[in-house]
Amino acid sequence: MSAVACANSSKSCLTKLFFLLSICIAIFLGVDSIKERYFIFDQNILQSVAQENIAKYSESGNTRAMLENIAADLQKEYPGHITTKEEWVFNNAGGAMGSMWILHASIFEYVIIFGTPVGTEGHTGRYFADDYFIILEGEQWAYKAGELSREVYKPGEMHHLPRGHAQQYKIPEHAWALEYAQGWIPLMLPFGFADTFFSTLDFFTLYDTLRITGKAIISELLKGKL
């Protein structure tokens, strides 16, 4: 093949690649502009449910009963979109570790109960999604680069991490939270799985996470929910 033919072939491949990339970006931007149509959860309602249960169980200190009742209340509020089957899996992301109960997962939203009884800290991640972290028990500390004092979130309070932002956070001793993410959930997964491949090598947890999340997303898609 002549040098001219090789050059023309390379140019053709680059042109096709650029065209496909342009199509993908256009589709992403188009869907991103209308994704709000597919949101069914409201962070203020989630916070209200959390606060009601915090008040209900504050004297007894029965954490498990509180978490189970939150799941039941959310099932009543969003029938057909919350799983009350209690399946816990570890979650390692950004250097932090906790366990989570996935209540809902779809393309554009997830709702989980996340926490740890022993404390943890790490990087929040930086996402194409808004993240709402509603404290149920314990505390969460956080700060942005350049800040010289920490933010402190206590039971009933909601920590909002806006899309595209990142912080360091810490659960100083123990905490449980109702977490809601609103945006491109699949694009959050690489951050969520990176520690498995480069640190923990806990592929049993990876399997369980993919199984539960995949089942939930497919179930929502069959209902017409992205």
Image (spheres, rainbow, N blue to C red):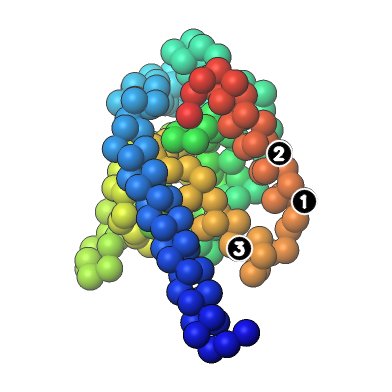
At mark 2, the secondary structure is helix
Compared to residue 45, the image places residue 188 above or below, namely below
At mark 1, the secondary structure is helix
Q: Amino acid at mark 3?
A: Asp
Is residue 56 in view from this perspective? yes
Give 112 or 198, whichever is nearer the viewer.
Answer: 198
Say which of marks 2 and 1 sits in front. Answer: 2
At 62% from the left and 29% from the top, the residue drawn is 218
Seen as rendered, the residue at the extreme bottom is 3
**The N terminus, quarter of image:** bottom right
- Count of numbered tags: 3
Reading the image, the residue beneath label 1 is: 204
Reading the image, the residue beneath label 3 is: 195
Where residue 42 sits in the image (x, y, percent)? 34, 25
Q: Amino acid at mark 2?
A: Arg
Reading the image, the residue beneath label 2 is: 211
